[in-house]
Amino acid sequence: MDMLNEHFDLLDVALIRAIPLGGNQKDDSFGWHFTKTGLYTVKSGYHTARHDVVRTFAATGSGPEITPLLASVWRVRCPPNIQHFMWQVLSGCISVSANLGRRGIACDLRCVRCGTDMETINHAIFVCPPARQVWALAHVPVGPNFFPTESVYANVDHFLGQQNPGAHVAAFPWLMWFIWKARNACVFDNIIERPEDIVRVAEGEAAAWQQAQLEEDQVTYPIIPGASEIPVRVATASLPLVYSGYRCFIDGSWKAGDLYAGAGWCCTSVQTALPFLGAKNFRRSLSPLHTEVEAFVWAMRCMIGHDFREVAFYTDCSDLVKMVSSPSDWPAFSAMLYKGDRQANVSVLSTTLFHFGER
Ligand SMILES: [Zn+2]
């Protein structure tokens, strides 16, 4: 401790002391600490770059304010690759002929599909006649000076925000995406796709993705902590009165500036009248989420210590549930999720982590 104070800034000392220690023999690796998961994302890279670097492009054109619009595409409910595509559309990073021409590549600037106008991004996705047909067939309210307009920002904004006229068209990211794919099929493979087929495929993909989001809660995942042999199931909980095994409610408490963080659990079963309780504190870790993980890992150890089998864990922390569902998406926590004491863990027969309550 004195050594730390001697060599580091006080703020850094607090951070260093909060770093969780892994019990496993894993080599150090580089991490990306601008997201809470530790995984690099284009969005966080973009934000980090914008804070430190002068703006690399300036959006031109009329219509809605570009920065909030760019930010809002990451909140659209669709797969990340399509979010990224929408971001590229708004930032002008799509290889349409107009953009290639601007970079000095000698090519015909006209749109291959209609052969009349110059192919800008807005033209390819919204204005070109086959694209217009797709939007009309998908029941997007259209009209002169309304949709589609000459501004790509206004056209994307048409669908964002609860109040906007296209807000009810949940498939619009897929429509944009499949219009672009159809444009590429035309340019590169000379394949002409019919607008009604594009709408059908886009709406089908959108519906399948949305359905998958609902079912994701029901999947079984093998992990945690350390012992890959324990399957941990993740589910959204409702609490029936009759159940078998044990229910263990867990929570962590973390406050910036405090020296310690706290964890607690309360375990019930139908066989016992009074609940079992546990509480402890430990040195404050890096974030509230770290404390939730520590609380979960510690509660699992306690259940093993009590020799409780068939324990269902309940947490109000949705990030903890996501982490347990796909630990590889949360490298910042790998040291905590794979702590060593295997022989202790194998005795838990089945473990389920439920999300319950709001957060
Ligand atoms: Zn065209």
Image (spheres, rainbow, N blue to C red):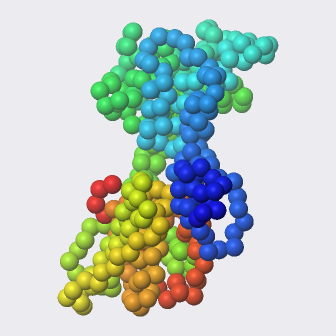
Residue visible at 44% across and 62% down? 259
Q: Position of residue 231 (x, y in %)?
A: 50, 76
Identify the residue shown where x is 39% and y is 9%. Answer: 145
Please give the count of numbered marks on the rendered protein.
Answer: 0
User: Looking at this view, is 266 or 87 the one in front?
Assistant: 266
Determine if residue 182 is in view: no
Left or right of 17, for residue 200:
left
Can you give x and y, in whole percent of width and height, for residue 318 in the image? 39, 58
Q: Is residue 47 visible?
A: yes
Residue 156 screen position, x and y as percent: 46, 24
Q: Is residue 47 above or below residue 103?
A: below
**Residue at 60% over, 57% down:** 5
Residue 103 higher or lower than 49, as above or below: above
Front-most of residues 4 and 44: 4
Residue 198 in the figure: left or right of residue 138: right
Q: Is residue 24 left or right of residue 163?
A: right
